Image (cartoon, grey):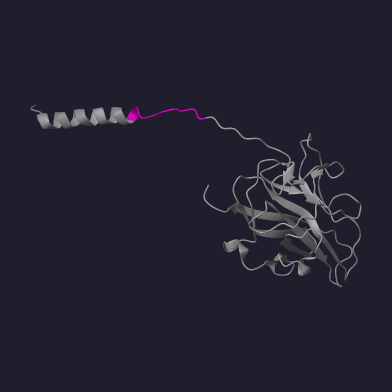
Amino acid sequence: MKIDRRLVLIGVMLIVLSMTMATQYVTTKIGYTYGIVHPSDSDIRFIGSDNSSDNIRVLRVDGDNSSQVTSLKVEFDGNISAGQNKTYTAAFGIVNEEEFKVNITYIDVEATSGSNYLKVWVHGDRDQMAENDASSVYVFNQSQGVLENYANGSTVWQLGAGNQDSTNMDGTSILTPWDEPAHVRYSRDETNAVNQTDDYCWVQISLDIPTDADVTETYTGNIFVYTRAATDV
């Protein structure tokens, strides 16, 4: 039987090509590293300020810096009656330690049991009610949820670049020492934060309880703080 030499050549080329394709497997090892730290020491960190009714910071964790349990929580301790409003002008602070500016895009609150009666502002004056603070931004309303459609790209507040040092904020001028009962860093410094300049801001939370609130219910939930880099990094 006579075989066309061109077919033989094509067959050889196909064999060579399949051998070449079959050898294109490469293994490369690339290392990585990161650390897991306390929430008061992270790049976007959270610090306490106001005290709750038990004279411990509203912001606290269940463990300390040496514990494996360091989950943040906001404890509104005490009894609040129906029809009452209780406001913490600095329930907690948000501090940026990244070496570039970071935007807080929005804050959301999820009720896991009971109704959602929280109202949330971001502002610069730690001990001033939000309605008396020209810098304040109203971000969450119990009935309306996230306000002004922040989730679609608007910025609530821009934190200035930090210095990668969790012992201070506003450059190095404000110290954030440890508070042992709450197991968080804290500040009660009266220096006002300036939007787009300083590396920190304060979060005001109001519990605005209606007169028909269920007094037999337990009220729990989660607060979500969303951030993003202000520019490509």
Q: Residue 123 falls in which quadrant of the image?
A: bottom right
Residue 79: x percent and y percent?
A: 91, 60
| Quarter of the rendering containing residue 192 | bottom right
29 drawn magenta: yes
Where, quadrant-wise, is the N terminus in this rendering? top left
Which residue is depicted at the point 78% across and 37% down? 65
Q: Nearer the viewer, residue 64 or 68?
A: 64
Q: Position of residue 212 (x, y in %)?
A: 86, 72
Residue furthest to the front in view is 173
Residue for point 84% across, 68% down? 209
Q: Position of residue 186 (x, y in %)?
A: 80, 47
* 97 sits left or right of 71 in the view: left
- Stretch of the chain drawn in magenta: 22-30
Using the image, determine if residue 191 lies above or below residue 10.
below
Residue 191 shown left or right of residue 104 in the figure: right
Which percent across, then down, holds residue 43? 66, 44
User: Is residue 40 visible in the rendered structure shown here?
Assistant: no
Residue 56 or residue 73, whichever sits in front: 56
Task: Give the vertical position of 182 relative to 13 (above or below).
Answer: below
- Residue at 80 percent across and 42 percent down: it is 177
Q: Is residue 93 in sight in this rendering?
A: yes
User: Left or right: where does residue 108 sit relative to residue 11?
Assistant: right
Q: Main secondary structure of the magenta part?
A: loop
- Please check the rendered image and state whether residue 132 is part of the magenta-colored stretch, yes or no: no
Q: Nearer the viewer, residue 42 or 131?
A: 131
Q: In the image, is 40 to the left or to the right of 10?
A: right
Q: Quadrant of residue 117?
A: bottom right
Residue at (65% x, 35% y) in the render: 35
